Image: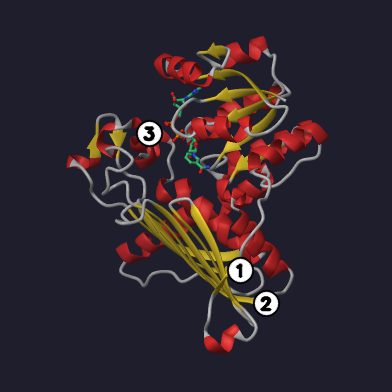
Amino acid sequence: MRLLMLGTGGMARLHVKGFNEIDGVEIVAAVDTDEARLTEFRELHGIPRGFLSLEDALAWGEFDAVTNITPDRVHYPTTMQILDAGKHVFCEKPLATDHARALEMTEKAETLGLINMVNLTYRNVPQLQKAHELVKSGAIGAVKHIEASYLQSWLVSKSWGDWRTSPTWLWRLSTKHGSNGVLGDVGIHILDFAAYAAGVDYATAFFRLQTFNKAPDSRIGEYDLDANDTFIMTAEMDNGAMAAIHATRWGSGHLNDLRLRIYGEKGGIEVTDTNFNPKLMTCLGDDVDAAKWTEVTVEPTPTNYARFTEAVRSGVNAEPSFRHAANLQRIIDLAFVTEKDRVEHKANGSPAKAV
Ligand SMILES: NC(=O)c1ccc[n+]([C@@H]2O[C@H](COP(=O)([O-])OP(=O)(O)OC[C@H]3O[C@@H](n4cnc5c(N)ncnc54)[C@H](O)[C@@H]3O)[C@@H](O)[C@H]2O)c1
């Protein structure tokens, strides 16, 4: 598979690593509108060609697929162009900035019969795959209750650099720059993580979003800091199970930590991923009476990069697909509706709306 990389920022290096591990993949060119970044990236990874626009790369056309690693708001216009050019697309999450665009992308890819996948990265975690398998096999019985969180701390910690001076973090804080805040950025991961492991989907949801004041007039340069930086969600799943899910960028002591617990009628499962160190624990059988948890060892599973490559080879699409990501986007859109309703009701002095 001849692969074009679109975007050479922070996440792009993980795509190079992920695709370089797979036989038969050749990264033939990279595109970035920032020439300095593009040059540095190509030199570092030995990428033979570079383009300053997607249009120039499409005019050249000597590739089979594109991995789209641009900022969230750029996914829609660029992916539509790539699909129109008849190339397969592996797109970063979130697929788009709203459900309508995500659905348009999905329908175009499906109509044209092109491979379309979204990089919900935690699908790469074997412990998550094993949890999904265990739940599907009935190990914990019918799922009743889910709790999940995704904690980052880059609004407090400088471990990943200073967000005040870095465009990589600043666009994530600004709706004008296409960000849906922590919900769109990492909330989408934990929503997928929880529902995938539990083998269920979201039926209804209620959200609270909060954006804290972080700078004078809530602005730094061209960035209005108006995107949510903490959210709390309650949901009912399509099997009737209840879920409490939250995420924040204010989680001191947690650089990048996911935690999921699923409780069923026969037992429980916990999947954690603490700064990229995953762990799976179960409480099953006799352990339930003793409230004892046991770690489960797992075998490696194929990454999204491998599954996308295989899908392009075989011509059969794989998960997580555009359609799956568009469905998640529908839930995220609902957050803004429930948040707006709550505010309007409060402004009118009437009680917050219950969903
Ligand atoms: N799956 C994950 O775990 C994960 C982790 C981090 C980021 N991401 C996603 O990856 C994407 C990129 O994030 P990032 O942190 O690398 O951002 P970034 O800002 O560091 O990099 C984005 C790059 O895209 C370039 N760019 C912008 N518009 C472009 C265009 N029209 N054509 C070509 N290049 C363009 C920018 O110049 C920049 O170099 C985002 O959608 C983000 O949500 C996913």
Which structural element holds mark 2? loop
Q: Is residue 62 left or right of residue 41?
A: right
Nearer to me, 244 or 139: 139
Which structural element holds mark 3? helix
Task: Give the CA distance from mark 3 to mark 1.
Answer: 34 Å
Check disc 1 and report the residue beneath it: 237
The extreme bottom residue here reads 289
Q: Residue at x 72, y 34 (%)?
A: 309
On the image, the x and y values in percent for residue 168 come to 38, 33
Q: Residue at x 27, y 38 (%)?
A: 162
Check disc 2 and report the residue beneath it: 142
**Crowd band around label 3 with a 10 angstrom C-alpha radius: few (<14), some (14–19), many (20+):** some
Q: Is residue 262 left or right of residue 256?
A: right
Whether 194 is drawn above or below 226: the answer is below
Which structural element holds mark 1? strand
Q: Residue at x 57, y 89 (%)?
A: 289
Task: Give the CA distance from mark 2 to mark 3.
Answer: 42 Å
Name the amino acid, label 1.
Met
> Residue 66 got which mark?
none
| Dot 3 or dot 1, earlier in sequence | 3
Name the amino acid, label 3.
Thr
Task: Give the CA distance from mark 2 to mark 1.
Answer: 12 Å
Check disc 3 and report the residue beneath it: 168
